[in-house]
Image (cartoon, rainbow, N blue to C red):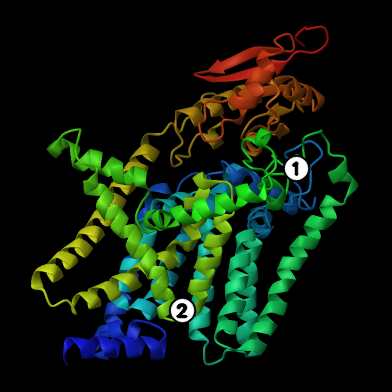
């Protein structure tokens, strides 16, 4: 068979089956040999997943950032107190995060009979390890159906080695369970084509789609894709049925949010700024996103022009983000070049040597999205496309790679689709020189991507190993974890928290940029400091809570305390006293009465 007829046959298979599997299967192998290959590759990806977890099975799961909120909400559910942020004064009802992950936390607490994060956190870590291995197997099972055995294994490896895949699996975040459930839904839809429309098939599909929305609001993209893939295939009755079913979890959550926002507790919170739009843990996503910049609320509400500019700017950057999602971030590409090329070429090595393969990786990942459409993989195409549009409306460009993390399994498959197409298109090039050059560029891009991932992997685990794990003065239950990028600022913050645990009186309210984790470690009520540009206004708000202690940390990612609370304290030295310092982290105490310290 000549080259053109081979490609025509592959295209025919693509149109007929909706996948590259027919074109990429190992037709010359016997059936037992193919089965052994599939089993071997499946074991291989599972072993890789296990190896990525073996060094980090001990200690509680990482509860920094959003993870602390999920845990607090789960504790509230387990204690029968409703869906509340019980770490704050007044225990406000939660309306930002759907209750899927907190429910998982509550289940662990009920089974174990304790809410101690050091105990429950260890079992949550093991649960996440199992989910990580399950994701590797589910992704390979799906990918091999769509792109073939070898390319499917390659897509799985690309996903597992991406820094955000294993980094976020180490934290009590929704990215890992969300990605797992979405891959399971895609596989279920692929396997149930012949039984599509049956009550059992649609019920399972609805449960999986609903679970993604229960895990995170971005699950609306999964619901949309589940409905849309039936509509785009002209199964309009099925699409209407799915739309009705998809509306149930969405409307139920919106009803909860509306009920809370209309309640007296919401209108009269425990402290004045508890439900301010910039209090991103205490308000809905829609309220928080109405600000031009939620981390700089003084810029005011977002205008239509700013929103449009934001979406266009984010869309423009998306192809490069796709490249980062299937390889590594641009910073790690440069860091890899510094580690591998600088010793040979000197400190002024040409950055084009890493920029070019990175741009090629971004091109392949973007091209892969078109290949999803060509392959008629409608659920994947609609899920990725609608998710990207959602991400582009958000005002947090620094969080984009985290938001794209659940898409990495599908972006990796898309990249492999593009790679298969690219390899077949090369065969049509008559010039041997050009054909070899194109093939070399493709191989070099893959090799460079894997090299960057390998360097990033070693760097991440090395930093994790040498990051401070012992926090001065802490009890034994909290001195075991080694978390990714738990670096010096977090070490100092933890030492300040330990000091408060032994020096602050019971019930003292602490303001910090990580209030939920502080509450879990000390039991003290904790709040975020107000984000007010006017120091006098910020100080007045802190006095009214009233806040007894304030931690001004050194963190660059969340520098709320330095930007807003510290100027407020410095503007009124008679009301605040510096009582403890660890490195650059400071603890201030509010002075009562006539400027006298209690």
Specify whether 187 is left or right of 144.
Answer: right
Specify whether 436 is left or right of 512.
Answer: left
Q: Could you say which disc has been placed on residue 422 in the image?
A: none
Query: In this view of the protein, which residue sits in the foreground, 51 or 294?
Result: 294
Question: Is 511 located above or below residue 142 in the figure?
Answer: above
Disc 1/disc 2 C-alpha distance (Å): 44 Å
Q: Tag 2 or tag 1, which sits nearer the N-term?
A: 1
Percent across and percent down for residue 250 are 71, 67
Q: Quadrant of the C terminus?
A: top right
Q: Which residue is mark 1?
A: 86
Percent across and percent down for residue 202 are 63, 83
Q: Residue furthest right?
A: 264
The residue positioned 69% from the left and 83% from the top of the image is 240
The residue positioned 34% from the left and 77% from the top of the image is 147
Question: Is 396 located above or below residue 374 in the figure?
Answer: above
Q: Secondary structure at mark 1?
A: loop
Specify whether 62 is left or right of 527.
Answer: left
Percent across and percent down for residue 70 are 64, 49
Q: Nearer the viewer, mark 1 or mark 2?
A: 2
Query: In this view of the protein, which residue sits in the foreground, 517 or 299?
Result: 299
The residue positioned 48% from the left and 39% from the top of the image is 481
Q: Which residue is mark 2?
A: 377
Percent across and percent down for residue 453 are 31, 52
Q: Is residue 126 visible?
A: no
Specify whether 12 is left or right of 441.
Answer: right
């Amino acid at each position: 068979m000549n080259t053109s007829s081979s490609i025509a046959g592959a295209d025919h298979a693509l149109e007929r089956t909706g996948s590259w599997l027919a074109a990429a299967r190992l037709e010359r192998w016997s059936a037992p040999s193919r089965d052994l290959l599939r089993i071997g590759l499946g074991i291989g990806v599972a072993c890789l997943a296990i190896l990525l977890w073996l060094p980090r099975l001990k200690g509680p799961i990482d509860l920094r950032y959003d993870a602390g909120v999920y845990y607090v909400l789960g504790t509230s559910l387990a204690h029968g107190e409703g869906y509340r942020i019980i770490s704050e004064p007044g225990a406000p009802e939660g309306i930002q995060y759907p209750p899927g992950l907190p429910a998982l936390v509550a289940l662990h607490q009920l089974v174990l009979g304790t809410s101690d994060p050091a105990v429950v956190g260890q079992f949550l870590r093991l649960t996440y390890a199992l989910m990580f291995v399950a994701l590797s197997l589910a992704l390979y099972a799906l990918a091999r159906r769509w792109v073939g055995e070898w390319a499917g294994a390659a897509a799985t490896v690309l996903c597992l080695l991406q820094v955000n895949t294993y980094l976020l699996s180490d934290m009590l975040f929704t990215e890992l369970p969300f990605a797992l459930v979405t891959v399971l839904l895609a596989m279920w839809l692929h396997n149930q084509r012949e039984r599509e429309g049956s009550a059992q098939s649609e019920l399972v599909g609805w449960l999986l789609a609903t679970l993604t929305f229960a895990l995170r609001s971005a699950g609306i993209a999964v619901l949309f894709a589940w409905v849309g893939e039936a509509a785009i295939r002209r199964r309009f009755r099925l699409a209407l049925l799915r739309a009705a079913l998809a509306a149930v979890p969405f409307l139920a959550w919106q009803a909860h949010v509306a009920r809370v926002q209309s309640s007296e507790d919401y209108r009269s919170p425990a402290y004045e700024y508890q439900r301010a739009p910039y209090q991103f843990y205490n308000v809905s996503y829609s309220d928080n996103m109405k600000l031009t910049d939620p981390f700089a609320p003084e810029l005011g509400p977002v205008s239509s022009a700013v929103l449009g500019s934001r979406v266009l700017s984010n869309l423009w950057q998306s192809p490069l983000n796709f490249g980062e999602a299937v390889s590594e971030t641009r910073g790690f590409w440069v860091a890899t070049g510094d580690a591998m090329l600088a010793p040979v070429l000197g400190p002024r090595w040409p950055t084009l040597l890493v920029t070019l393969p990175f741009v090629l990786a971004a091109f392949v990942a973007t091209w892969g999205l078109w290949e999803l459409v060509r392959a008629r993989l409608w659920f994947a195409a609609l899920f990725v496309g609608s998710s990207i549009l959602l991400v582009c409306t958000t005002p947090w460009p620094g969080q984009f790679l985290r938001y794209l993390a659940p898409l990495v399994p599908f972006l990796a498959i898309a990249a492999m689709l593009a790679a298969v197409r690219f390899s077949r298109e090369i065969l049509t090039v008559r010039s041997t020189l050009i054909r070899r050059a194109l093939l070399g560029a493709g191989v070099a891009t893959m090799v460079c991507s894997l090299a960057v991932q390998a360097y990033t992997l070693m760097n991440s685990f090395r930093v994790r190993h040498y990051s401070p794990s012992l926090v001065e003065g802490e009890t034994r239950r909290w001195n075991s974890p080694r978390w990714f990028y738990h670096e010096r600022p977090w070490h100092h913050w933890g030492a300040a928290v330990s000091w408060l645990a032994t020096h602050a009186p019971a019930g003292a309210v602490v303001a910090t940029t990580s209030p939920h984790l502080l509450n879990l470690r000390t039991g003290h009520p904790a709040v975020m400091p107000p984000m007010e540009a006017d120091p006098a206004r910020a100080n007045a708000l802190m006095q009214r809570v009233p806040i007894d202690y304030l931690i001004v940390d050194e963190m660059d990612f969340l520098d709320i305390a330095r930007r807003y609370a510290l100027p407020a304290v410095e503007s009124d030295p008679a009301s605040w006293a510096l009582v403890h310092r660890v490195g650059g982290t400071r603890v201030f105490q509010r002075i009562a009465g006539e400027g006298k310290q209690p």
